[in-house]
């Protein structure tokens, strides 16, 4: 019976998509795939949320090789999908090549900048959000040693680490920040076992708050931190619920909002530079019932004050990617 | 005992294997709620429907021809080279270094220079496992696969440091404009055939076809090829006939590694025009299936490579069109590899028996 329903449902969905309007938006995921429990999945979540709220439908594609990038963009462009959103910095080169061929369509690229009149480039101020959770980490730490575990060692992740270290040192100038990267390949995004090992290593060096900016690897970090009785900090999505009482907070990078906003804007998507920072809710720290007891009013006040200063431009957090150096942390 | 005729060996067995794979795939597609006939239509149309799609199919096929030939040459000496992946990756490094640091004035020179560098690097990566096999008896399967795992971190290191372009991507800078190989559309345009320039197929396809001819001539028309086959059939008989095992193993593996490395002409010099992380994307392993299905003969490899090109390109279209997860497409590709490669004997043996039975009847 259930199988029959599934079949009927599937064929109904097929019939619907066949008659879908041409202007459906499209999203293309990066090599990690849409179920990577991290960046791509957040983008997929934003697209799904849009579809659920509007009842609309969207086209999607997961590439399996680098050679497919231009092909995937062209494919959706030929079908008239508008706008076409792509998640990940690797899309910059192919998008720069393809976008001028379809001046009537709108494109949106997340995490990278492509300078074309019909492309919206969405970048996040991850260093600002990381600064705030760095402050929280230093305030929660008892011995002044905090840890950072990154995924793949790329400038973007160093940007997280550098912002985090600046925040921690702003609260406690004597704080020690230990930073480790899981690896140098995309596999580093999904290696919870290695994440767990790195967590144990950092705990043995005295770290009692550990921030994981490592995609699926972070699951191992959070689990081990909970098992060992230290605090952890989640990333991208709100991961506070995963280990209540152990996850201090989460640095939220609202990739889902970026996709949702682009889909909502539809063909009217505004081209240009779109910086998602503290001032417009693109990044932030998560506060909910799972960590309410961990964040004291004093901590909250300090972070809110810094947040307001950053948003107003009074306090500038150094962005690692602006010059590929970090004044407070060596890699 | 009478064996089955040649046509059955070359045509009937692979076709039956494919049909079996297609039936299982159809059941899989049916189980996830799609019509298998429609899915087949989308795959064929996606792979061959227009010239841009054909270009993608041929691009993948070009990769598989190189890696398939690499496996075949080694196999004729009964060396199972499953290090094509690493050899092609290192070949890519050779091609990239040649194109980045030598200012070739024209693409024809870059093709020769980059191609030779790719072949030399690929051959060098195969040389150590070959030497260990020839002199120390270390099993070639183990050593070649180990060398894959040494190629990955080496390229990781280089692409994240010494030869990395600025920015976030672990990749080298793009090669100079003058070194870009002509697209297939430019080549076919020169002889008056209009072909889309939106696909990645390029001049490397012609090199791949030449490589097929080279391998055919090498294996069946030269003394070295004869020695290689003799050694492959029986090492002790070959030794008795004065053939030196060390020499045959080394030469067969060097040619094999060189062919795998030359895949870089297609994916690095022809398509990406720079070296990116994980540039080979499994083509080295697909080469094993291509060689098995093509019975280690260049003609068979050419056909099998095009078939796998169709599977790759059509599979991508299938996942985009029906929004089925890409993992399902991998399942379908894996079924084809399973039936045509690994389970080859499952089809072959009954058919062989059938032919023997009928052959006896005819003789009576």
Image: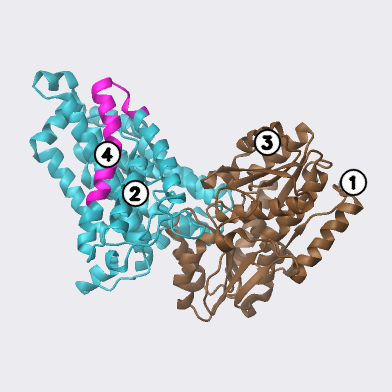
Chain colours: A brown, B cyan
Q: Position of residue B296 (x, y in %)?
A: 24, 39
Q: Which residue is mark 1?
A: A293
- The answer for how far apart the CA atoms under marks 2 and 1 are is 54 Å
Q: Are marks 1 and 4 in contact (CB under 8 Å)?
A: no
Relative depth, front residue between B346 and A120 = A120
Query: Which mark sits nearer the N-terminus, 1 or 3?
Result: 3
Chain identity of mark 1 = A
- The answer for how far apart the CA atoms under marks 3 and 4 are is 41 Å
Q: Which residue is mark 2?
A: B93
Q: Which residue is mark 4?
A: B124
User: What stretch of residues is rendered in magenta?
Assistant: B116-142
- Which of labels 2 and 3 is toward the front? 3
Q: Is residue B137 magenta?
A: yes
Q: Is residue A244 magenta?
A: no
Evaluate whether label 2 is on the same chain as label 1: no
- The answer for how far apart the CA atoms under marks 4 and 2 are is 12 Å
Evaluate whether label 2 is on the same chain as label 3: no
> Relative to B193, is B41 above or below?
above
């Amino acid at each position: 019976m259930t199988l029959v329903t599934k079949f009927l449902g599937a064929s109904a969905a097929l019939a619907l998509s066949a008659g879908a309007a041409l202007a459906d938006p499209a999203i293309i995921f990066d090599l990690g795939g849409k179920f990577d429990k991290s960046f791509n999945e957040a983008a997929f979540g934003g697209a799904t949320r849009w579809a659920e709220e509007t009842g609309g439908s969207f086209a999607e594609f997961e590439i399996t090789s680098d050679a497919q990038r231009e092909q995937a963009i062209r494919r959706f462009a030929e079908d008239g999908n508008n706008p076409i959103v792509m998640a990940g910095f690797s899309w910059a080169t192919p998008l720069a090549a393809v976008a001028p061929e379809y001046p009537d369509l709108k494109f949106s690229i997340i995490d990278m900048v492509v300078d074309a009149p019909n492309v919206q480039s969405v970048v996040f101020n991850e260093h600002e959000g990381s600064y705030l959770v760095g402050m929280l980490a230093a305030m929660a730490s008892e011995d002044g040693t905090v840890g950072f575990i990154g995924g793949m060692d790329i400038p973007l992740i160093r940007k997280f680490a550098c912002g985090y270290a600046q925040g921690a040192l702003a609260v406690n100038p004597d704080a020690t920040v230990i930073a480790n990267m899981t690896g140098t390949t995309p596999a580093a995004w999904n290696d919870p076992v290695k994440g767990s090992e790195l967590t144990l290593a950092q705990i043995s060096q005295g770290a009692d708050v550990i921030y994981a900016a490592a995609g699926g690897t972070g699951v191992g970090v959070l689990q081990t931190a909970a098992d060992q009785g230290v605090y952890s900090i989640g990333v991208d999505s709100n991961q506070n619920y995963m280990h209540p009482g152990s996850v201090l907070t989460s640095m939220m990078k609202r990739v889902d909002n970026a996709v949702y906003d682009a889909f909502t804007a539809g063909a009217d998507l505004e081209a240009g530079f779109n910086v998602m920072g503290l001032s417009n809710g693109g990044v932030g720290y998560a506060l909910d019932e799972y960590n309410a007891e961990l964040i004291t009013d004093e901590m909250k006040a300090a972070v809110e004050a810094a947040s307001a200063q950053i948003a107003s431009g009074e306090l500038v957090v150094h962005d690692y990617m602006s010059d590929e150096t970090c004044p407070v942390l060596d890699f | 005992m009478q064996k089955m005729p040649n046509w059955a060996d070359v045509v009937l067995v692979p076709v039956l294997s494919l049909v079996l794979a297609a039936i299982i795939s159809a059941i899989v597609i049916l189980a996830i709620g799609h019509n298998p006939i429609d899915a087949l239509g989308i795959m064929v149309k996606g792979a061959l429907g227009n010239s841009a799609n054909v270009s993608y199919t041929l691009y993948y096929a070009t990769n598989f021809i190189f890696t398939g030939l690499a496996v075949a040459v080694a196999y004729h000496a009964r060396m199972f080279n499953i290090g094509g992946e690493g050899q092609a990756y290192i070949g890519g490094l050779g091609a990239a270094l040649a194109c980045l640091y030598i200012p070739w004035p024209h693409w024809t020179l870059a093709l020769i220079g980059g191609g030779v560098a790719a072949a030399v690097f690929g051959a060098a990566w195969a040389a150590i496992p070959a030497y260990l096999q020839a002199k120390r008896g270390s099993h070639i399967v183990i050593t070649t696969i180990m060398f894959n795992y040494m190629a990955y971190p080496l390229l990781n290191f280089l692409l994240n440091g010494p030869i990395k372009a600025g920015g976030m991507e672990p990749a080298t800078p793009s090669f100079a404009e003058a070194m870009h190989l002509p697209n297939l559309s430019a080549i076919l345009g020169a002889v008056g055939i209009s072909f889309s320039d939106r696909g990645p197929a390029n001049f490397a396809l012609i090199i791949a076809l030449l490589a097929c001819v080279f391998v055919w001539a090498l294996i069946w028309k030269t003394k070295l090829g004869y020695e290689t086959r003799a050694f492959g059939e029986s090492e002790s008989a070959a030794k008795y006939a004065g053939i030196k095992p060390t020499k045959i193993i080394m030469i067969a593996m060097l040619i094999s590694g060189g062919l795998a490395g030359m895949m870089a002409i297609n994916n690095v010099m022809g398509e990406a025009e720079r070296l990116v992380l994980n540039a080979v994307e499994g083509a080295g392993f697909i080469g094993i299936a291509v060689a098995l299905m093509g019975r280690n003969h260049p003609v068979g490899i050419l056909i099998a490579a095009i078939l796998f090109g169709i599977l790759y390109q059509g599979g991508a279209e299938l996942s985009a069109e029906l929004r089925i997860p890409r993992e399902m497409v991998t399942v379908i590709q894996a079924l084809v590899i399973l039936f045509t490669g690994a389970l080859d004997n499952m089809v072959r043996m009954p058919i062989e028996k059938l032919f023997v039975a009928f052959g006896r009847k005819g003789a009576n």
